Amino acid sequence: MANSLNLNIDRSSPVPLYHQVVQGIENAIHDGTLVPGSKLENEIDLAAAMNLSRPTMRKAMDELVRAGLLVRKRGVGTQVVASQVRRPLELSSLFDDLSANGGKPTTDVLTFSHHEADPAILEKLGLAKGASVYHFTRLRLVDGKPLALMENWVRDDIVEIDEAGLADHGLYGILRNGGVNFRLAQQRIGAMIANDYQAPLLETTPGAALVTMERTAVDDTGRMVETGRHVYRADQYSFEMTLVQR
Amino acid sequence: MANSLNLNIDRSSPVPLYHQVVQGIENAIHDGTLVPGSKLENEIDLAAAMNLSRPTMRKAMDELVRAGLLVRKRGVGTQVVASQVRRPLELSSLFDDLSANGGKPTTDVLTFSHHEADPAILEKLGLAKGASVYHFTRLRLVDGKPLALMENWVRDDIVEIDEAGLADHGLYGILRNGGVNFRLAQQRIGAMIANDYQAPLLETTPGAALVTMERTAVDDTGRMVETGRHVYRADQYSFEMTLVQR
DNA sequence: GCAATTACTTTGTCCTGACAATAGGATGAT
DNA sequence: ATCATCCTATTGTCAGGACAAAGTAATTGC
């Protein structure tokens, strides 16, 4: 039952050793080399087999446990977790909500303006009274069919944004290019009924179910850079995630 | 700006040192000793000040970074993240969705049965054809007002469940008592419109917005123990989370 | 034969030490 | 004065070792 799992570790690569191990095991699980339910060799031997130290091996396994692919039990060993539970959107997808679903996503910019922020937005972005923000609404389509209506506010003291760039590179593309490194985001997911404004844009009827998502993103210097409110057609979108009990 | 942060580390305590540090810093942030935006001392000095090794201190900080309370930058230092972004439900709340909101949560068991599982449930729980499951629906109320309608299926080869116990101890209470250690869960959040069955139970009207949540929970041996579908009144509930970019 | 004890395996925690990579400021040359 | 270069502070990665705790299996005593 103990799978030996031969991985190639490239010590000259710039990618950290523990991350190479993470990817290696991930791949092994995906392509069936590591069967769900099977037990891995113990940390010491595994580390020795790859010429790594135990802390390095452990750090790799830590990540996989956090990701929900492995399960450890003291005195027993480490197991590949039951299949079925796939790698979901997961936390890492701080940006680019979709695009993985196969279809071709496109975006229409509906409105674009640059004006003084109202109090609610000032608070959400932690700005001083009188500060200005970019404000725009966009329609996200997949294969030409409307999926989401997105309204965003972005502080204007970091990157300059114009309508054309927004359409071409996307919001996060512009911000990343402008040197913004996002670190975390707070997000709230709920539901509402499509109103008369939203319904025609999303090609549905007033009263249809919508998934709502509000998000505020923070960069690595602690500034709240962007906040927004998105609504998705409930029949075409839902949020998947894997929760890990530490 | 460098906060010294005097923490008491109890080396005789059974709780790991790194976890004591995590709690200490968490508290310091909460009660204002550590101001958002302020810089911490560097890892080496902090570790030395508490008579800890750097790896131990780092492990503690790792957790706080993952939780979104701290932000690290190589060559620069570690910062307390901007306020506003509070500790949300977060991953740890695999169970006990609410109860923190102040009100008194109660639960009514509406239906309870034990029968052969249909194919969809068999697949979700990874059971063989012909296996039986517990199936029940519950109404969750806060301060007597209905909040959520919950329908669950639980495999019957681990713990015996009866209606009275369910009402008294809750589903996760029973399972934990029965020796089930949950490790992870896959969850999907979406939206729908209240139908004629749901509306009166939730004391709302057909057509009202509902948040839907489907979840399958896996224990530490890799078994899928429980799956369920919950609907919440959208005007009273939403899912909050913090996403961390690693 | 059965139960309590012991031994062993494996993960969990912690330590010391070292060097690399990056960001930012200080320094120096032009 | 301005720009390129060097230096320093700080986090990122990695090694090797040691002991504790928990779960499992084997052994022993009755």
Image (spheres, coloured by chain):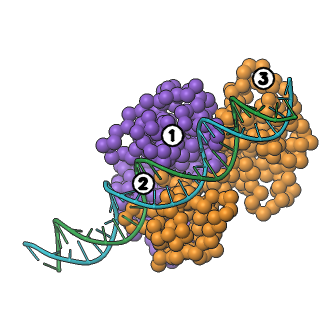
Chain colours: A purple, B orange, C cyan, D green
Q: Which residue shows up at 55% across the image and 63% down it?
A: B69
Q: Is residue B25 left or right of residue B118?
A: left
Query: Along the polypeptide, which appears first: circle 2 or circle 1?
Result: 1
Q: Secondary structure at mark 2?
A: helix
Give coordinates of residue A18: x percent, y percent. 44, 44
Q: Quadrant of the N terminus of chain A?
A: top right
Q: Is residue A23 left or right of residue B218?
A: left
Spot occupied by residue B115 in the image (x, y as percentages of width and height): 84, 26
Q: Between tags 3 and 1, which lies in front? A: 1
What amino acid type is highlighted by mark number 3?
A: Ala
Give x and y (percent) for residue B230.
Answer: 74, 43
Q: Nearer the viewer, residue B117 or D12?
A: D12
Q: Is residue B204 above or below residue B131?
A: below
Residue B121: quarter of image: top right
Mark 2 vs mark 1, CA separation in Å:
46 Å
Residue at which label 2 appears? A171
The residue pinned by badge 3 equals: B131
Q: Please check whether the numbered discs 3 and 1 fall on a single chain.
A: no
* Amino acid type, residue under disc 1 in the picture: Ile
Which is more foreground, mark 2 or mark 1? Answer: 1
Helix, strand or loop for disc 3: loop
Q: Amino acid at mark 2?
A: Leu
- The residue sitting at 79% across, 29% down in the picture is B157
Left or right position of B197 against A168: right
Residue B12, compared with residue A137, is above or below; it is below
- Indicate the chain on which mark 3 is placed: B
* Chain for disc number 1: A
Task: Say whether residue B160 is visible.
Answer: yes
> Does residue B190 appear anywhere in the picture?
no
Q: Which mark is residue B220?
A: none
